[in-house]
Amino acid sequence: MNNEDLFRAVGEADDSVLNSTKIHTANRKRLIAYLAAAALLTVGAAVLILTKPWENSPKGEHSVGPQAIPMMCSDPGVTPDPFVKPIPLPEAGATPNPEWYKDEGRKEYKSAYELAEDADCIIRARIGEKTPAMVQTHFDFDNNGDPILDESCMKPRTLYGFYIVEIYKGGKAAEKLDRLLTEGVAYLQTDFYLCSPDAPKLDCEEYILFLHKPEIGSDWLWDNCAIAIGGRDDVFEVRYDEKEKPYIVGRFPEMTFEWLRGLEN
Amino acid sequence: MNDDELIGLFFERDERAVKEAQLKYGGYCFSVAKNVLGSREDAEECVSSALLKAWDTIPPKRPEKLGLYLLRITRNVSFNRFKELSRKKRGGGETALVLDELSEVVPAQGDAASEAEYNELKNAVNAFLRRVSQRERRVFLDRVFELKQIKTIAAELGMSDNAVMSLLSRTRKKLRQYLEREGLL
């Protein structure tokens, strides 16, 4: 077998594989955006039904619904959220354990700065409490039918326990990261949203998601919508090293699209 | 004219089929052929050959996606042409670079796969492409299936050239690991 065999084999990929990459038209983008929003709502509702957060609510408190979701904008002077509980920093001199990030072709060390440089946007998100809040999806659309998800304030919503509180868009993701790093929180890197609401490690902490997406638009939503059609990706936790540079310390293989599909089914 | 009508023309042996297919998919096929060969004239020739092959094979073949069917034929014809030109020390395009990149996954020196091995490889590649993220799949196929230049992919997706190259490199590594796990390497 040689590289030409591989070249030919790729040329005979199934129609469904080849077709899945061709999503270009504005109408389709709009449709996909709406479908994605609908899928998020559906799955969010499924999470609610499965986890029955209201059964754990202290009497008289509303742990579900808009009251539980703080409104935050991408304002540089953002007030610390009382829900956010920064995790302790790793011990001085801690080094990344290669075992944590050695599979799936990600053998190399990558700092969060490097991740951020590659990323096209950063989403600052907070993992929900044990009680996933009601999904509140809010998108505006521009004239091309693309969802507007820039630095304007958007309504927070939850997705499998994520509260999206800020969205940063643009090629200067690393610069934005500088400010965020000073807040002493833990970070999570993922290409997509993947989170188990009952993953104890991720409970009630704040993370940064680096979205390595070519654009914040319908492709981004499409990829999120992919939870309905399967696939998987990597989820990493990133912490600081002794020089206060962030590094990947953990991978969460349990958080896969398959897992999410299980929820849906 | 939609694909069903077009395929209908092929089945009725109506020569408009080739003309209509050329109108509808000729541009797309040409761009891939041009990526493979780097020469406009060679690419045009290959698209014409591909359309004739389609004429010869439909019927009995009834492709589900006519565009992809034509594209595959064009790619194969163009690749054969590329090899012919390479022997004569001619030819440009992205093919040599893409083959070189693929040699990170499967070395260039190996013997050609037997039919059984090739079928296994094809299935594994399909399975792998279903597993990876849409972004990885898109960039990988843009490069290896359509042989687009890195800078073209980067521009289309709003990424930097480095980001595209790095993503491709990671995907190739994953593919190699996957083929190893499947016992193909």
Image (cartoon, coloured by chain):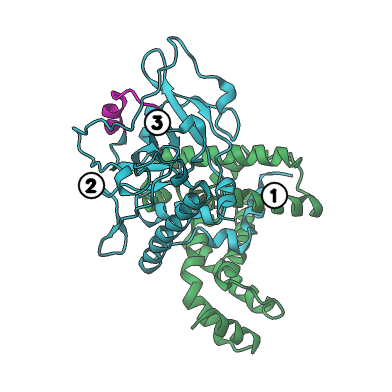
Chain colours: A cyan, B green
Seen in the image, is A90 located left or right of residue B121? left
State the image quarter where residue A179 is shown: top left
Badge 3 element: loop
Badge 2 element: loop
Q: Amino acid at mark 3?
A: Glu
Q: Amino acid at mark 2?
A: Cys
- Circle 3 packing at 10 Å, graded few (<14), some (14-19), many (20+), is many
Residue wearing tag 2: A153
- Who is closer to the viewer here, A12 or B22? A12
Seen in the image, is A190 located left or right of residue B117? left
State the image quarter where residue A232 is shown: top right
Q: Is residue A177 magenta?
A: yes
Is residue B138 at all visible to an observer of this figure?
no
What x and y, as percent, mark residue A53? Answer: 45, 45
Q: Amino acid at mark 1?
A: Ala
- Circle 2 packing at 10 Å, graded few (<14), some (14-19), many (20+), is some
What x and y, as percent, mark residue B132? Answer: 57, 47
Residue depicted at 77% across the width and 43% down the height:
B111
Badge 1 element: helix
Q: Earlier in the sequence, mark 3 or mark 2?
A: 2
What x and y, as percent, mark residue B133? Answer: 53, 48
Q: Is residue A264 magenta?
A: no
Residue wearing tag 1: B124
Q: CA distance from mark 1 to mark 3?
A: 39 Å
